[in-house]
Amino acid sequence: MDPGLAAALAASVAALGVAAVTLVVSLAELRSQRATLDTLRTTLATIRQSLPGGDQRWFWTAEWQAGESEADAQIAANETTFFGSDEEFLAALEARIGQPATSERS
């Protein structure tokens, strides 16, 4: 065989080998990315299932959560008052606002 032809053939085979290796690596990367996407889809589905229903979404709004954080801080700072009964609460409310508190309970 002509040495030039043999060298050209060897170079072509080497190039094909590099291309084959590149293709295998690319396929492995695609499979890895596919697995990552599948994991993300599963995670998102789990998160969606754990979200509260329509009548409870208000609780998770930024505004409401800010109020929850404020309340937690007040509780932690012992800035709360405990009332032993509804009557105690209403008496304290009446004293604070200077007029009788109304109750719509039956």
Image (tube, grey):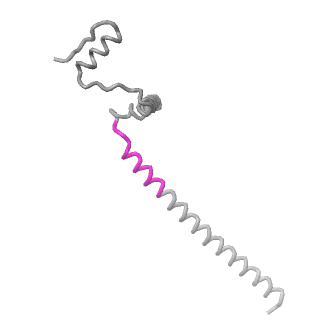
Instruction: In the rendered view, tell whether residue 43 sits above or below residue 23.
Output: above
Q: Position of residue 58 (x, y in %)?
A: 39, 31
Q: Looking at the rendering, in which quadrant would you find the C terminus?
A: top left
Q: Which is the main secondary structure of the residues drawn in magenta?
A: helix
Q: Residue at coordinates 23% horizontally, 21% vertically from top-left?
A: 86
Q: Position of residue 84 (x, y in %)?
A: 25, 25
The answer to which quarter of the image holds residue 78 is top left
Residue 38 among those drawn in magenta: no
Q: Residue at coordinates 27% horizontally, 8% vertically from top-left?
A: 100
Magenta stretch: give its range: 39-53
The answer to which quarter of the image holds residue 64 is top left
- Outermost residue to the bottom: 1
Residue 64 falls left or right of residue 31: left
Q: Residue at coordinates 74% horizontally, 79% vertically from top-left?
A: 12
The answer to which quarter of the image holds residue 1 is bottom right
Q: Position of residue 59 (x, y in %)?
A: 39, 33
Instruction: In the rendered view, tell whether residue 91 sits above or below residue 80.
Output: above
Residue 58 falls left or right of residue 33: left
